[in-house]
């Protein structure tokens, strides 16, 4: 596939994905909205005709297509990791304290927490280019996440029962819980590695191409900002509000990239012409403030339960607004 054809496909995909992102911001998903999203998914695949087939084996893959596909899997990890870790920590804390916890003390893992992973498993394999290792890792992760959610749910009612009410022949819920967590954590690490490997390739290729086209301007700094933001959120997701102080080193590179972006944004006359830029800047400000506040709270040992989850939600909003940015339209006459 020629470079011009790759760019054409990438632009078409980006436009359709932009429409999809806007739909997500319209509010609750009613039947009309769901139908529109289904139509967008069909059109994404229709664009990839035989003439627009992926590059031959061994040829460089278009980074824009890989980036669009990765969004599904990154969203899966970001939205599922915090509630799954929260369930693990709550059960573990009760075990460590040796007390009889109430079911209300352990939050259930809601189906909504895994919706983005279900979406990634359903839609990811349909998007070009094929990434079988990533797709397989994501499918395994979803299966293990469901298993862990069920194990947490099994521990909750067991804690409210009296010893005489338990069936001695039944498998110990605590044993099931520990095994389920170990399998989920292994699957999580495998998926993280696949995402990181592909994301590093995409970041390098896209930043180089953007710099070649227009230097280190607004688009370059926006993309570099998102690259720098990822490690901090990833580290937070692997810790709780007591141990996450170790993540402070990842905040500094993000803060530096944030300051650089804001300086370029303020000096760039055409910033207002970039579609969705005001919404992105607003989300960026909210995320930066919440992340900075969490960093300070962790340093002072004042972080509260749920603070990491709140920062993760702000980051997810930032990702969605970043995905809606359209620098191509701003560059048009």
Image (cartoon, helix red, strand yellow):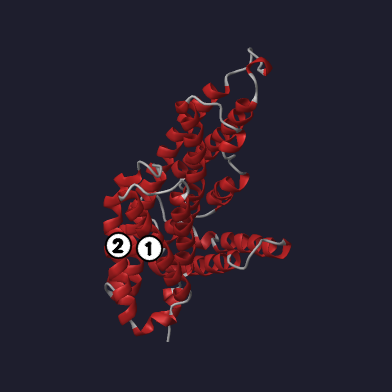
Cα–Cα span, label 2 and label 1: 8 Å
Does residue 191 lie above or below 33 as drawn? above
Q: What count of labels does the image hold?
A: 2
Report the residue marked by disc 1: 288
Q: Residues within 10 Å of mark 1 (few under 14, many from 20)?
A: many
**Residue extending furthest right?**
31
Name the residue located 63 percent from the left edge and 65 percent from the top edge. 27
**Position of 219 compared to 53: left or right?**
left
Q: Is residue 26 left or right of residue 90?
A: right
- Decide which of tag 2 and tag 1 comes sooner along the chain: 2
In this rendered view, identify the residue nearer to me: 266 or 224: 266
| Point 39% across, 56% down: residue | 61
Residue 70 in sight: no
- Element under disc 1: helix
Report which residue position mark 2 lands on: 255
The answer to whether 256 appears left or right of 226 in the picture is: left
Relative depth, front residue between 249 and 74 = 249
Res 270 → quadrant: bottom left
The quadrant of the rendering that contains the N terminus is bottom left
Q: Give percent across and percent down for residue 82.
A: 48, 45
Measuring from the top left, give residue 209's x and y in whole percent: 31, 67
């Amino acid at each position: 596939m020629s470079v011009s054809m790759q760019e054409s496909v990438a632009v078409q995909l980006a436009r359709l994905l932009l429409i999809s992102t806007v739909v997500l911001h319209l509010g609750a998903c009613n039947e009309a909205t769901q139908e529109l999203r289904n139509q967008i998914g069909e059109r994404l695949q229709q664009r990839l005709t035989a003439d627009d087939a992926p590059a031959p084996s061994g040829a460089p893959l278009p980074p824009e297509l890989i980036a669009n596909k990765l969004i599904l899997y990154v969203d899966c990890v970001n939205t599922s990791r915090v509630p799954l870790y929260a369930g693990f920590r709550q059960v573990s804390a009760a075990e460590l304290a040796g007390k009889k916890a109430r079911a209300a003390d352990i939050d259930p893992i809601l189906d909504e927490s895994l919706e983005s992973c279900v979406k990634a498993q359903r839609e990811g394999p349909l998007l070009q280019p094929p990434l079988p290792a990533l797709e397989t890792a994501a499918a395994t992760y979803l299966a293990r996440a469901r298993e862990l959610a069920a194990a947490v749910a099994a521990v909750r009612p067991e804690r409210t029962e009296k010893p005489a009410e338990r069936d001695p022949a039944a498998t110990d819920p605590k044993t099931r819980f520990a095994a389920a967590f170990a399998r989920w954590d292994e699957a999580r690490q495998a998926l993280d590695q696949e995402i990181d490997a592909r994301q590093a390739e995409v970041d390098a290729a896209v930043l180089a191409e953007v710099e070649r086209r227009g230097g280190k301007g607004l688009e370059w700094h926006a993309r570099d900002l998102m690259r720098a933001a990822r490690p901090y959120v990833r580290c937070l997701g692997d810790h709780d509000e007591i141990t996450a102080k170790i993540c402070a080193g990842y905040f500094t590179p993000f803060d530096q990239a944030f300051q650089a972006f804001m300086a370029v944004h303020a000096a760039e006359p055409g910033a207002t012409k970039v579609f969705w830029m005001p919404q992105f800047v607003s989300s960026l400000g909210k995320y930066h403030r919440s992340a900075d506040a969490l960093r300070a709270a962790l340093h002072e040992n004042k972080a509260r339960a749920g603070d990491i989850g709140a920062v993760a939600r702000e980051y997810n909003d930032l990702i969605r607004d970043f995905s809606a940015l359209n620098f191509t339209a701003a560059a048009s006459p």
